[in-house]
Image (tube, rainbow, N blue to C red):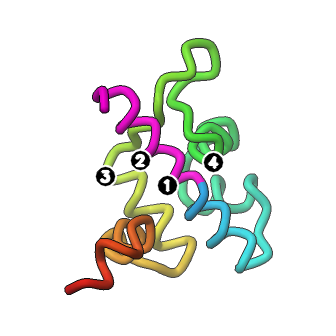
Amino acid sequence: MSESVVEQQVADRLAARLRELREGLDLTQEEVAERAGISRNHYQLLEIGWGNRQSKVPANPRLSTLTNLCHVLGTTVPDLIAAMYPAESSGR
């Protein structure tokens, strides 16, 4: 698998997990973005899995952004990442 395919798969898993957590808390994208200190557009891109609308490169958020989002969504960065890979993390 090429690096770009793997990066897109990771971005897609992150997008799905962020959306799942947000919907579980009955929050809008705008509410999450505001509470995390990022723009609504930035958060929308993360939930799509893109880093940029025009080039559609895979999302690759900063650790500080993930930390802020996890605080808003009631999780931690390690738990967020583990939840993105349930089959791999359950074998511990």
Given residues 46 and 31, the one toward you in this image is 46
Of the residues under marks 2 and 4, which one precedes in the sequence? 2
Of the residues under marks 1 and 3, which one precedes in the sequence? 1
Question: Which contiguous range is marked in magenta?
Answer: 1-15
Which residue is denoted by mark 3 in the rendering? 63
The Cα atoms of the two marked residues, 2 and 3, are separated by 15 Å
Given residues 14 and 77, the one toward you in this image is 14
Residue 47 marker? 4
Given residues 6 and 17, the one toward you in this image is 6
- Residues at discs 1 and 3 in contact (Cβ within 8 Å): no
Residue 10 marker? 2
Q: Which quarter of the figure has residue 28?
A: bottom right
Single out the residue that lies furthest toward the top. Answer: 54
> Is 2 one of the magenta-colored residues?
yes
Which residue is denoted by mark 1 in the rendering? 14
Single out the residue that lies furthest toward the front. Answer: 1
